[in-house]
Image (cartoon, grey):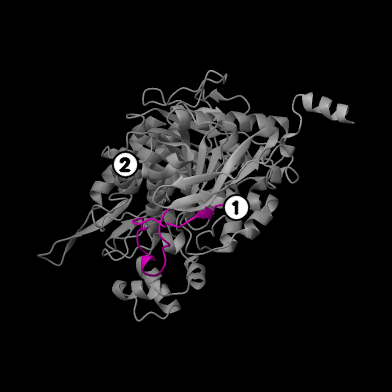
Amino acid sequence: MRAVLLLLLLLPGWPPARAARSREAPRAVVAGQGALLGRELLLARGQRVAQFLAVPFAQPPTGALRFAPPRTRPLPAWDGDRDATAFAPACPQSREELERQELVFKLHLAEMLDEITFDEDCLYLNVYVPDGTSPPGGWPVMVWFHPGNFNAGAPQLWDGSVLAAKQKVIIVTAAYRLNIFGFLALGNGLSPGNYGLHDQVAALDWVKGKISAFGGSASDVCIFGHGAGGISVGLHTISPLSSGKFARAIAMSGNALVPTAVTRSKTQEVLESLAERFACRSASHSDLLPCLRNAPTSPLAAHASLFQWGPVVDADANASTAFLPKEPKELLEDGQFKQVDFMTGYTNMEDALLHSDIEEMDKGLTQERFYSFLSDMVQQESSESNNNETCVINDQYIIESVSFFYRPYPQTSDTTLLRDRYMDLMTERNYGAGAYLQALKLSKVGSTYFYRFDYKPKHSLVPIKEWVKVPHRFDLPFVWGMPYWPNLASSIVWYGGDRKISDVVMNLWTNFAKNSNPIQNTLNIKWEAFTEEKPGVMILDRFFNMSDGTNIDYKGFEFWNNYYPVVVQAATQCCIFNNTATKFHENIIPNKIKLLLVGISYLVMR
């Protein structure tokens, strides 16, 4: 028997890794705060990762700090070893909205969603550190801002263990305040809003000052995010408050120029509703703010879900604290953006699953339905953007222009073709055009890469129709290495091709985070940098090829970025009042001329 044991001990790989001598729990000492005692996770093939969870990066935003920028001086501190092995609560939100946003988790990782709790004391981040000796200068760092439309989401859903272990980078997932708690904007300097974005800035400050305690490089930080997180990343590249806090940025399915990047809420309607619900004395700004600071958390979060919240132009705040002093497009046009390397892109049918009539679209779209969708889109946009009571917007002109560009020619009875053109319209309008324009601007100061994600796994993550290509968030499983997540092995059928795609995508993302270039010699892929002279787009599917010009509609980008604003301007008629007389002048003739010129230029462009 002893001889057999001796023989086994001489065999390579024996004893098994899980039976090896237990190692001490990972420990990190964060200057100015204290010591953290994390946990080590053993992955497949002996890969290990150290997790440090629920690390505070700001004081709890409660009481007088509700509806205020995060307080980071001093940072929370403690004596002895702090247990960093369990996640902190997520920021307050509607659980129903969280489940609606996180459909993949709801179907396949319901227990993760069920375990999430909510609390205003939520400004924590999680650090995932790869095993081994860090390189000279420290591990590259990737800081993640989660999706959720600025109203829902939780950093603990995004397990950075696989990405950190396989790609040898530190992953940081940071919380930020959501909905009313993160974005209440009252104006007059009382509550400028954008607190959730200030939270992200505070998280970046923490990373810059503290990540060396985990072996990370403070000068080698890449921020990345998806959806609302992608919008956040895009806004950080132009915000004066984010300057010098990161070197690279990856904006996925969101950017600074998407139509929802800046919220234009009906302030008075929101004030009146909040004042009535929480028995505030009046709906005035000065009375409402202290009243809402005393409102109970859960009812406030529930009522807040009735409204849309998000980033605002906070120019009325103190100049030194404004996160977004101008409209994003103005900042980009003025050249007020960071000298950072930038990667951005979107999926090829982003909003397909968000459409209310997705089931009806299975058979296609009729001409009448196509036109009706355009009317709804234009009218909603007109009502949100027209705050001047002296102006009238001729929606019909706008609808006809959009319809002319997107409906197929010659006219066809193929309703599926019309449906696909409508999906192209929504993807290019809401995601592609903004990503393209921001990439054009940032390519002037740094290495820039543009992609479209077209890979659809054989086994769909959620039940979808065959005609639906790659919807919003269907790229995330491959970026995060989900085919290797142990808790997904039993609920999702991953094929070998899915794992290969995930391996390549993780490589591309982390290569960019490390070197400002997504490709390395080990990858047999040619991804050309995006420039104004050569605005190439990488098509991320099974083949990983640059667009040949037939599968990317550059005119669609041009339409939404440059032509559509002119159409809207030409369709807007405003009354100019003369203070010395009761008569007014209607600005109609110049607009008719503009419409004629627009029509001519449009025909030339087509």
Q: Is mark 2 on a helix, strand or loop?
A: loop
* Tally of numbered discs: 2
Residue 457, percent from left and from top: 68, 36
Residue 173 versus residue 277 in the image, above or below: above
**Residue that carries the numbered disc 2 in the rendered image:** 243
Q: How many angstroms separate mark 2 from mark 1 (CA)?
A: 31 Å
Q: Residue 102: which numbered mark, if any?
A: 1
Where residue 43 appears, x then y in whole percent? 67, 38
Q: In this view, does 422 lie to the left or right of 288?
A: right
Q: Residue at x 62, y 37 (%)?
A: 48
Specify whether 252 is left or right of 568: right
Look at the image and give the residue range highlighted in magenta: 57-85
In the image, residue 459 lies in the stretch drawn in magenta: no
Is residue 400 shown to the viewer in this render?
Answer: no
Residue 488 sits in quarter: top right
- Pick the quarter of the image with the C terminus: top left
